[in-house]
């Protein structure tokens, strides 16, 4: 404990030194103000603490410290952090995912795929259906708890077939779960808070409301291509030895899943209704039911999720609650909530005239990027986003919208909305390093996959996905979001 305290004090002192350097010593290059230099110092100091101490208490400290700079009022700051609708949306999605996991609904869906009769005795079919199930589940859930669930399911399969830690298949499958899980986060806005965060940015900047259907029309076809690239790499390049999977007793796995009970049916119905409200406003409007479609659209993303989470926490089945609030709160990754408030506060406060940071970034980067051909600019932005999110926070990467979209609007031929969609999706595709996301260290941390193996296959996949986003997803987005 003494050593841990000593280490934390060193990290805090280093952060304090960074803050003092920017706030009181370094000159402020115009148009950054002295207060703006303090904001920059707080940001870099907190970035250090995020890397060394995690994302929980440093994020709380960060928001409080921003209030000391005087760049904006405390009321405005909190309105743009804790008062933003993204925070309750994120909490509600975590609770909904916890409820699905507790009732066994998620495991039921996963096992349904790999226990199809045509998988019996066919190792590669079993693995293909396993990863396909993972992708489909993550389309409607946040990935970290689903990755944990599928890793546990994979371990169960390995025990049934005699595989152990250190075997090639264990390394490949466990890191493959990470690859597919995080890739799938880019494909829909459902329970994927960073995608909807970019939607909020677009509405504020352009007055344009992006529907779930529009985003999915752009990203789901691309998702099929992303999944096939992963599968081809897994099957023909990683190609682990899979022979013993032919002995997997499909019937025994199927028998381990009891019949669907009342709790699962209630949860499935509630979550399905939430998804309908998220996805179908445009559909109802198109068939003339504008009152229904308009009502759904006015609810936004947070209200349906909060209502469903609240109801499911309050409903009892056979005299027992589906989930207690204590269990629901344990299912919330509170560090993710704290870092969301911090980063969204950054995006707001950096853009203020009294801060000057965004103006300085524009002045500095526009001469470098402004003269680029449109597609080269898109490729450079996509590569930057993919590189950044594979080292640092996904949420911090999503906030790069505030840097690149203003520049994109000055370049002829660049569609800023389509590019924003690339940022929204790309910031979720973090897989190549243990520090890339909350789930990034799970395969190595559990002792299944060496970090070197994760990076060996993760970075080529990131490179391939970068090209696909830039040359396939972006043109498709230009068609959907034509100006």
Image (spheres, grey):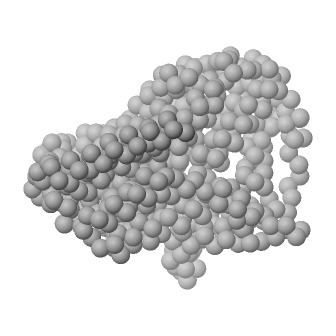
Q: Please provide percent x and percent y for residue 258.
A: 88, 49
Q: Residue furthest bottom?
A: 291
Question: Split into 4 quadrants, where in the image is the C terminus?
Answer: bottom left
Front in this rendered view, residue 19 or 244? 19
Residue 202 on image: x %, y %: 35, 63
Residue 456 x %, y %: 48, 22
Answer with the quarter of the image where residue 96 lies. bottom right
Which residue is at 23% across, 50% downward?
Answer: 20
Above or below, comparing residue 13 to residue 325 in the picture: above
What residue appears at the point 44 percent right and 28 percent down from the top-left corner? 459
110, 481: nearer the viewer: 110
Which residue is farthest front? 2
- Left or right? Give the position of 322 relative to 401: right
Q: Is residue 420 visible?
A: no
Left or right, residue 145 beside residue 373: right
State which quadrant residue 308 falls in. bottom right
Q: Is residue 425 above or below residue 211?
A: above
| Rendered view: 167 above or below 59 | above
Q: How many marks?
A: 0
Residue 303 visible? The answer is yes
> Horizontally, is 195 left or right of 18 in the view?
right
Q: Position of residue 238 (x, y in %)?
A: 57, 20
């Amino acid at each position: 404990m003494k050593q841990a305290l000593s280490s934390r004090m060193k990290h805090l002192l280093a952060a304090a030194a960074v803050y003092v350097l920017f706030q009181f010593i370094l000159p402020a290059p115009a148009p950054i103000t002295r207060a703006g230099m303090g904001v920059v110092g707080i940001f870099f100091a907190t970035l250090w603490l995020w890397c060394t101490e995690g994302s929980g208490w440093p994020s709380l400290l960060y928001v409080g410290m921003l209030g000391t700079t005087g760049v904006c009022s405390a009321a405005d700051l909190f309105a743009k952090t804790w008062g933003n609708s993204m925070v309750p949306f994120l909490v509600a999605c975590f609770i909904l995912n916890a409820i699905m996991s507790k009732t066994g609904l998620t495991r039921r869906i996963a096992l349904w795929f790999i226990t199809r009769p045509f998988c019996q005795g066919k190792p590669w079919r079993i693995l293909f259906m396993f990863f396909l199930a993972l992708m489909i589940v993550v389309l409607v859930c946040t990935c970290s708890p689903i990755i944990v669930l599928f890793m546990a399911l994979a371990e169960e399969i390995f025990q049934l077939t005699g595989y152990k830690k250190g075997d090639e298949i264990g390394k490949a499958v466990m890191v493959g779960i990470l690859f597919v899980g995080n890739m799938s986060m880019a494909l829909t806005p459902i329970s994927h808070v960073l995608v909807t965060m970019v939607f909020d940015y677009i509405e504020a900047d352009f007055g344009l409301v992006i529907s779930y259907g529009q985003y999915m029309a752009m990203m789901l076809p691309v998702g099929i291509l992303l999944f096939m690239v992963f599968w081809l790499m897994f099957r023909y390049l990683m190609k682990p030895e899979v022979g013993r999977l032919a002995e997997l007793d499909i019937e025994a796995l199927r028998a381990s899943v009891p019949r669907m009970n009342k709790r699962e049916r209630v949860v499935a119905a509630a979550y399905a209704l939430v998804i309908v409200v998220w996805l179908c406003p445009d559909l109802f409007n198109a068939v003339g039911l504008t009152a229904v479609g308009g009502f759904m659209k006015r609810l936004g993303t947070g209200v349906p999720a909060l209502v469903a989470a609240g109801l499911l926490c309050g409903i009892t089945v056979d005299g027992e609650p589906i989930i207690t609030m204590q269990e629901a709160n344990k299912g919330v990754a509170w560090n993710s909530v704290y870092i969301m408030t911090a980063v969204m506060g950054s995006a707001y406060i950096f853009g203020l005239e009294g801060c000057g940071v965004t103006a300085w970034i524009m002045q500095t980067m526009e001469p470098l990027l402004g003269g680029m051909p449109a597609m080269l600019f898109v490729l450079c932005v996509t590569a930057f986003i993919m590189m950044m999110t594979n080292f640092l926070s996904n949420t911090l990467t999503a906030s790069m919208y505030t840097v690149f979209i203003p520049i994109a609007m000055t370049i002829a031929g660049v569609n800023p909305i389509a590019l924003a969609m690339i940022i929204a999706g790309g910031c979720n595709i973090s897989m190549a390093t243990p520090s890339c996301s909350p789930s990034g260290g799970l395969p190595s941390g559990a002792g299944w996959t060496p970090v070197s193996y994760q990076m060996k296959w993760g970075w080529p996949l990131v490179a391939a996905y970068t090209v696909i986003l830039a040359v396939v997803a972006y043109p498709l987005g230009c068609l959907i979001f034509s100006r």
